[in-house]
Image (cartoon, coloured by chain):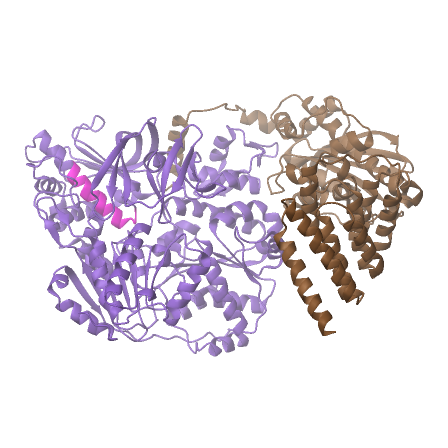
Chain colours: A brown, B purple
Amino acid sequence: MTAVTLERRLANFRAAVSVGPRIEVEAAERRERSSLAAAERLVATVGGEIVRGRGGAFVRLESSAVALPVDREALARLPFQPTPDRPLLCLDTETTGLATAAGTIAFLVGLGWWEADRFRTVQLLLPDHADEAALLAELASVVPGEGWLVTYNGRGFDWPLLTTRFRMHRHDAPGHAGHLDLLPLVRRIYRHRLPDARLRTVETHLLGVQRHHDVEGWEIPGRYFDVLRGGPAELLVDVLRHNAEDVRSLARLVSLMATGLGDRAAWDRAPAGDLAGLGRAYRVAGRPEMALACLDVALAADGRPAEPTPSAGHVAREEAAWWLGPADLPWGLRPAARPWADRAGDSWTEQRLLVERAHILRRLGRHDEAAESWVAVAAGPGRLAPLGWLEVAKLRERRLGDLPGALAATERARIAVDKRRRLGLPEPRLEAAIDVRLARLRRRLRVA
Amino acid sequence: MRTYAPAPTTEVLRRLLEEPSLARGVVHHEVIPARDADYGEWPDWLDGRILAGLKARGLDRPYVHQAEAVAAVHRGEDVVVVTPTASGKTLCYALPVLQALAEDPAARALFLFPTKALGQDQVAEFSELARASGLEISAATYDGDTPAPIRSAIRKAGQVVVTNPDMLNSAILPHHTKWFQLFEQVRIIVVDELHTYRGVFGSHVANVLRRLLRLCAYYGSRPVIVCCSATIGNPAELAATLTGRSAALIDRNGAPSGERHLLLVDPPVLDAATGARGSALTLAQRWALPFLRAGRQTIVFGRSRVAVEILLTGLREALREDLGPRSRVRGYRGGYLPTERRAIERGLRDGEVLGVVSTNALELGVDIGRLDVAVLAGYPGSITATWQQIGRAGRRTDASVGVVVASAAPVDRYVIHHPEFLLERSPEEARLDPDNLHVLLAHLRAAVFERPFEPGEVFGPGPADELLAFVGEWGHIRQSGDGRWYWSSENFPASEISLRAAAPENVVIIDTTPDRPRVLGEVDLFSAQVLVHQRAIYIHESVQYYVDRLEWGERKAYVHRVDVDHYTYANRAVTLKPLDVFAESPTVTGRRVHGEVMVASLVTLFKKLKFVTDENVGWGPIDLPELELQTTAYWLTAERLRGPWRRDDLDVALLGAGRGIQAVACVLLMADPRDLGLVTQVRSPHQEAPTIYLYEAMPGGVGLSERLFERHAELVTGAAEFIAACPCEAGCPACTGPRLEPHVDAKALALRLLDELGAATHAEGGAVGTALAS
């Protein structure tokens, strides 16, 4: 096939296809329109200043700093947090799509940092594809090498996307000392009182911020493309506000976590569920003493803010979900959350707190106390009764060398599981595990 | 011949040929003498560890083709290696890759296989060689089954990445920034099973490779491309079209082989008037049984899953009657669990499994060792595939037997009666058209997504500017102030491409058999009309599905698995209008033309036909809107016919000759008869003359018609020969098509017309085979 034939075929093809909404662009006019003109057009509507750099021009918008103090000492006490001397850079991007592949760009990068107690927001807006190098260069100069990024799902989305953008220009993404992604922390600590983990939900439920006339996330790429193709720049006003608000919410959330959970005194005011989640976070971070302390405060709490009472069916599924192990369920992922999984494991009952406590005690080698905690668990209702006794039996058999005690616990487990069978809730696998242990313990006791 | 005493292959064959009822059907028996190995030497630059590894595996010297290929790749030349099944092709690319990695562990290689299973096989083989050489090499498959945590490890550190074109299209290229280590350091790209990249699939893969090479150039690498192909007529040309670069052809096979017998068998005609024939399946069983009874490892190929089941049941029944080795005969096809398949493959290698009945699933490089006998129940559709199937039998030293039993289809019979096609240079060509506009534009979009286009940047045949402007009219890409073209849409264009369908608008086939419905595949609209209309039997990987309903508006077909003894055939009523002429040339009676046409197609009813016998067992209506298809075509006109022709006679003659040409065209260009539509017009409103059109039944075509235009003379002569050679009296479904009126001699009319069209003049030199060989 020659190029000439291809041209002919293109002409025939063009003639034959029914043309949809065709976008007529005068090529000559388009080429004349320099990117500087695009930047000027944006500035005229959305404000800010044009920054001309190597490889293009971009728009820089700075909002006045707001008072938003954060107790860095308190923050540093929380798991996975930066030490107080590290500068923090909050970052949130608006993009042309959800794939972090080569053809998606971040057309707006919202940044925020503290200057003493005041929080300052700066946004970098891309007037045209061709200006990306300049915007990225500015971003690279702003990211402090010794500092930490603060994002919401930035590990999974914003930063990989920006890394791809830098790579497209044959650069490495700017280095930084750490990355505080707030999403997994919010999941661990606050999931029990949130319907989902979207940043906007966090704002309404935790930060007391209500947005008005906010632009929906799915509208944003389309608005940007419209503006690129000559649509009114007003379309971006809402997007800029939305992004600035997101960046500020990152700061608010950091501040909330520091003051709400950062020192022991604050724990007394915190809901038991928050503490339980914090305990889980400490445990994952390899700080079991702190985790234990969290749980003790949570369990000691009387007259705390009431927890939502879960429905019966909910409890069953929730138990099944958390019993599977410490692996986190996918929860509130951006963009598509799995709604059923969102809810699993979001309520902390006293029984669950005791289970968590028992796990930590065992890890700390405090087997006696772990067994006690399991006994307390087994006193409760449901499937946890036989499971609790079984755990007691395991500890007594393996760690405490108390074979008769282990046998007694296993027998209690058997009774509890029989009771559930009579209620029409048989647990075949659990029963099998109990029977194996019963048989072994009886054999060992006879021998001994 | 009820004997179970083990006997040598040649002895069983001798006894079979003494049986008159079997011997009568043999139209050709060729004895290909044994040949010794032709060795070269390992190159002196080869790393000592690799050399030691080779010797440890008993490979003291390479075959000549291996030595030539390895040397060429080392020099940085692209090569295409064409040697038969099991001739040690893997080594041709494995060695240069091992050497590159031994010299520089940062080097990378990319292996492309058309299917997942093949890729996994090759990783195992490659890794074994690497281990034998004591080299620590990370070779891994990257496909849909690769778990997420392993994926990122492969992206960063996989030295040899084995994947398939689909993954390359949708998972690797659009995410190239995460693969930069691969793109910066890729030294060798291997394209195995080259001959499978033809037609629509090949046209897509050619564009995937364009995108791949574009990114390699951006990252500063210039990999050598090693293609490996089964025997086809135009391997070097195919490699050049597919990769856009010319490759050195390496086809001097140095592997040894024992004596081989090739038998071409035609089921006897039962009724000369209707042309009815004996069943290929029954005959294939009769040929296979004595070998099984004598303890010879035998593979029987059926063309469909149903054929496999019929053959398997038949063979097992027969062996049971005789208390023979029934349980050692196994079936093998798509739909079997991987573990089952592995067990059968292992059993074949170590001799535990005596016989296997398979679909073409065992045709490609899956390792099953070498067997004694291969029986093909029906021509597998191409000479390449025939050799790949026959090649499953072939001991290094002992004799082996290949039996091809023709079915009643025209193409089968054409090939059976031309043994020179199989034995001399293969006449068939793999064709693809990387510049099919539908395909090209889809990949151009994906390419813009991957990297902006510079003004004047070349993609495919030339600078892409005009094409980009065209795509830009739909708004997915835009030209920025700097003149570059950028992707400007939320969509992910690579995921919109189906590598197996030409046009972007496809019907998705959804299998509702499992609890969670799954997508089986996609077909373009034009094919959907005849393949997945309501109540059709759709065959996918040799498994039958019944189409419960076709939601035309939603472009979805819902199917479920069935096991029935029939298939469906939809009648397409076609009107055709030429749009443009790309090339034309005078013939004896008129013109031959390559051009573009608009085909309007209406499908109104389907027939249910029995497998094996093609007996009509019912029909049903189809209610679908008319479709227009813009495609390329080849046509010949006959303005200056000599004799007086009655209009009715000419009608019959055009159709008969057209069918002959269609059958020959399918053989020459490795096409499915469904891919080449036939329209004949006694007095074409557009040509003012009797005209035979062959159009490509996919949007835009894939380059078949251009080649048909060039091979016009062979088509006309071949068609005349083919029809003349048919033992029927006056035309039959196997040559000129089903007879519509009993008193008309379609055969004579078609031959008369072909004679006028120039068949006689070209037949002077003898048979087509001779003409092809020259």
| Residue B257 picture quarter | bottom left
User: Can see residue A305?
Assistant: yes
What is the quadrant of residue A156 in the picture? top right
Residue at image location 50% in from the left, 23% down from the top: A21
What percent of the width, then of the height, locates residue B19? 13, 66
Query: In the depicted view, which residue is nearer to us: A89 or B559?
Result: B559
Tally of marks: 0
Front in this rendered view, residue B557 or B730: B557
The quadrant in which the N terminus of chain A is found is top left
Where are the magenta residues, as a range?
Answer: B655-671
Q: Which of A372 and B634 is in front in this view?
A: A372
Q: Residue at x 54, y 24 (%)?
A: A26
The percent coordinates of residue B347 (x first, y second) are 39, 67
Main SS, magenta region, reads helix
Can you say whether B521 is above or below A57 in the image? below
Q: Viewer-proximal residue, B195 or A415?
A: A415
Residue A54 seen in the current view: no
Residue B676 lies, in percent from the top left, at 28, 41
